[in-house]
Image (cartoon, rainbow, N blue to C red):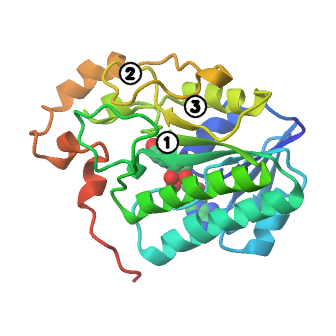
Amino acid sequence: MKRLLITGAAGGVGRAMRPRLRDMAQTLRLADMLPITDADTHEETVLCDLNDAQAVREMVRGCDGILHLGGKSTEGDFETILEGNIRGLYNLYEAARAEGITRVLFASSNHTIGFYEQDQRLKTTDPMRPDSLYGVSKCFGEALASMYHDKFGIETAIVRIGSCFETPANHRMLSTWLSYNDFADLVACVFRAPKLGCPVIWGASANPAGWWESVGAEAIGWHPKDSSEIFRAQIEAMGPKPPVDDPNSRYQGGLFTVEPIHQRQ
Ligand code: NAI
């Protein structure tokens, strides 16, 4: 691939992916609304607010694939979610359609299904139960990706990321953790697959404590290798698991289920 666009490249996952995806494309185009000042020789940077349709069109021009990580990544007021995740995603797909880009990885979230309880094992086909406005915006994103696939043939891997951090940080993340290396492997599988379609994929490592049935990416050859179990003793040493009626122990979405509706200040 000549040029892979990474949106949200200034964020936590974007920063972790940059060195791991070094060989995925001749050039990595790093885009964010925040400046990126440490681009390497194989990288180029674009300052772009996803809410700005014209800027998004210019951001995607000349790219062969899009790793879409940009947007509000936690609960927020409706306007912020609207700008980054709803209008922003519409702008991205419209730009991809206009510029002839046919493959996207969309960073969706476990918060699309966050109100399921933790003793339920879910399939990707189970109905959504978002736990926040943020989760609702990811449901919108999944629907938008599906429509652009059916109508225009743009292929998207819809990846419902669990918790993509260096290490799991609490008991819940022993079930939801996605290692950076497993995610980078998934990105490679998505952009190298001869045929992708529009699958929903659970973005989790091979955690024995996981809640989700088969990751959904076997067809493109992704088999996560890491396991959160090596961190169990460390997590347990930090304190006991919260009681069963605590949202962090009850719901798959954890504390997002008790977020209020925020107002823009
Ligand atoms: P992050 O918050 O660290 O990075 C997101 C980036 O998007 C930031 O650099 C931010 O400046 C940028 N951004 C926000 N609004 C924007 C806008 N309107 N225009 C342009 N850029 C904008 O998030 P993180 O952890 O790196 O997550 C990456 C993606 O994965 C996000 O879409 C998030 O929703 C999703 N995800 C992440 C999970 C995780 O465990 N890290 C879990 C589930 C989903």
Q: Label 2 amino acid?
A: Asn
Above-or-below relation of 29 to 55: above
In the picture of the structure, the residue carrying the numbered disc 1 is: 160
Is residue 261 or residue 37 the one in the foreground? 261
Residue plotted at (41% across, 34% down): 123
Report how far apart the C-alphas of labels 1 and 3 lie in the structure: 11 Å
Say whether mark 1 is within 8 Å of ligand 1: yes
Element marked by disc 2: loop
In the picture of the structure, the residue carrying the numbered disc 2 is: 207
Above-or-below relation of 220 to 159: above
Earlier in the chain: of badge 1 and badge 2, it is: 1
Is residue 15 or residue 95 the one in the foreground? 95
Report the disc number at residue 240.
none
Is residue 197 or residue 23 the one in the foreground? 197
Q: Is residue 17 left or right of residue 258?
A: right
Report the disc number at residue 183.
3
Above-or-below relation of 132 to 182: below
Give the number of the mark in front: 1 or 2.
1
Q: Is residue 225 left or right of residue 17?
A: left
Give the number of the mark in front: 1 or 3.
1
User: How many C-alpha atoms fall within 10 Å of the one at disc 1: few (<14), some, or many (≥20)?
Assistant: many
User: How many C-alpha atoms fall within 10 Å of the one at disc 3: few (<14), some, or many (≥20)?
Assistant: many
x then y, percent, for residue 186? 62, 29
Element marked by disc 3: helix
Earlier in the chain: of badge 2 and badge 3, it is: 3
Say whether mark 3 is within 8 Å of ligand 1: no
Place residue 34 in its image quadrant.
bottom right
Residue plotted at (28% across, 63% down): 259
